[in-house]
Image (spheres, grey):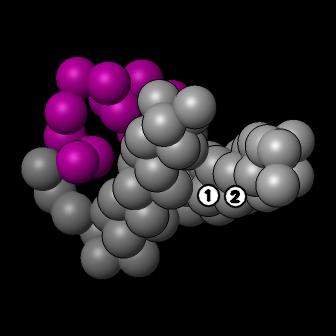
Amino acid sequence: MKMHFIIQGVFVIVGILSIAAALFNWDWFFTSQNTRYLVNHFGRQWARVCYAILGGLMIFIGIYFYLTVRAALPQ
């Protein structure tokens, strides 16, 4: 069961990184090959909004599954 908690922690950390990149407009993040498609097609501002939303979803998913797994564990 510990692996579940590690994966959920990774979800939260990646979500925080994505939101931080969107808020602080990190150049290294938005010039990487993985973000280039969104930046080129929708502009940097919309890419920042998309990554902020994705980061929030990642944090929500990590917390949701943490609570779900924790509730399923025997007391």
| Numbered disc 1: secondary structure | helix
For the point 82% across and 55% down, the residue is 75
What residue does disc 1 label? 59
Chief SS of the magenta region: helix
Camera-nearest residue between 41 and 53: 53
What residue does disc 2 label? 63
Q: Mark 2 near mark 1, Cβ–Cβ under 8 Å?
A: yes
For the point 36% across and 70% down, the residue is 20
Camera-nearest residue between 13 and 52: 13
The answer to whether any part of residue 72 appears in the image is yes
Amino acid at pointer 2: Ile
Q: Which residues are magenta?
A: 29-41
| Numbered disc 2: secondary structure | helix
Amino acid at pointer 1: Ile
Please identify the residue farthest to the bottom as the structure is shown. Answer: 24
Q: Position of residue 7 (x, y in %)?
A: 48, 35
Q: Is residue 51 magenta?
A: no
